[in-house]
Amino acid sequence: MAGLKFWRKKDQAADQAVAVEPEVIESKEVLETQIPVADVITPQELVKVELPKRNLSKGFKAVFSRIKFDVENLEELEDVLIQADFGVTASETIVSEVKAMAKKSGAKTESELKGILTELLTQKLSRTDASLNLDSGTQPYVILVVGVNGAGKTTTIGKLANYLVEGGAKVTLGAADTFRAAAVEQLETWASRSGSEIVKPVSEGQDPAAVAYETVERAIANGSDVLIIDTAGRLQNKQGLMDELGKIRRVIEKQLPISEVLLVLDSTTGQNAMTQAKAFTEVASVTGIALTKLDGSAKGGIVYAIQDQLNIPVKLVGVGEGINDFGFFDAKEFAIGLVGEN
């Protein structure tokens, strides 16, 4: 699984500069054009943090492993693509391209055709913006998490927090889903499991924006690297959700920029996930998708459909219930797992 690009500001106190005698410059012309040291602004240096890498290809459910790959008859492949929620048009295009690539290369065996399909899907699923935006150096990085209740929102937050803590990051969680008391309790459990701090509402039903504001204040005060804010998952009233998310964004952005708005979707719901994605992108300025339950889904094509139709990258994937059953989306790994190629 591709590693996360995570950059934090260099600890200047721990990296004292060594005094060096200035070089003697004899040229009068150079001396006259030198810029005074006091006028030179040195930006805050960033250091790259190496976070754990994981291989999750075995966690993806192969959807093509039981069909016969025959270059003369790929109708069955098209049917499986449609059933896996790639979409009719995309399925037709993929099969057509597989045929063309097979003809050009002379591929005939099942292994060769699987290799072509894997290569093609890797190309179509690859994006340059698949990594979380945690490399600007503007800390704490703020991740706002949205999604309907039951999609795995709180679990995803807990897994991501644990992953970051494993890599040495300090993480603060904000329980801004104040509509459900259970949501706060679940997030508190994940905070404990992951070793993260948590900011909870002081009373049931407290204004979510107030919780978000307090979370930002706490994260800045305690020197957190990342803060992750949970939000309510109600879609029944889009206008109400839009107003609530808009208010949360405004109070956060008074103090810090928002690095990511992650939409959590349950991959087992197939086209329902696409419907949710379209609804949330209208109200939440989504920058990335976190797909859960990919290990038990034969609907892996939803990854392709979301990126193709909404032009939003899938960034995170969940492939199990364990705290470590989580990683960052890698197109090649996903294609290998989906096709079932050895």
Image: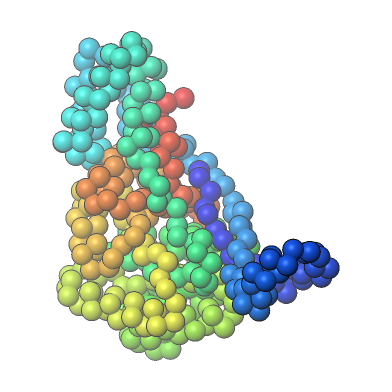
180, above or below 51, in the image: below
Q: In which quarter of the image is residue 331?
A: top left
Q: In x, y percent, where is residue 243?
A: 23, 79
Is 28 placed left or right of 173 in the picture?
A: right
224, above or below 268, in the image: below
121, above or below 206, in the image: above
Q: In which quarter of the image is residue 109?
A: top left
Residue extending furthest toward the right: 21
Q: Which of 6 and 316 is in front in this view?
A: 6
300, above or below 196, in the image: above
Q: Quadrant of residue 234?
A: bottom left
Asked whether residue 110 is in view, the answer is no
Q: Which residue is drawn at 35% across and 57% down?
A: 288
Is 8 placed left or right of 241 in the picture?
A: right
Asked whether residue 267 is in view, the answer is yes
Q: In x, y percent, where is residue 139?
A: 52, 72
Q: Residue at x 37, y 55 (%)?
A: 290
Q: In x, y percent, where is residue 134?
A: 49, 61
Q: Which of 207 and 15 is in front in this view?
A: 15
Q: In x, y percent, where is residue 278?
A: 20, 58
Q: What colour scheme governs how the chains and residues are painted in the rendered image of this protein?
A: rainbow
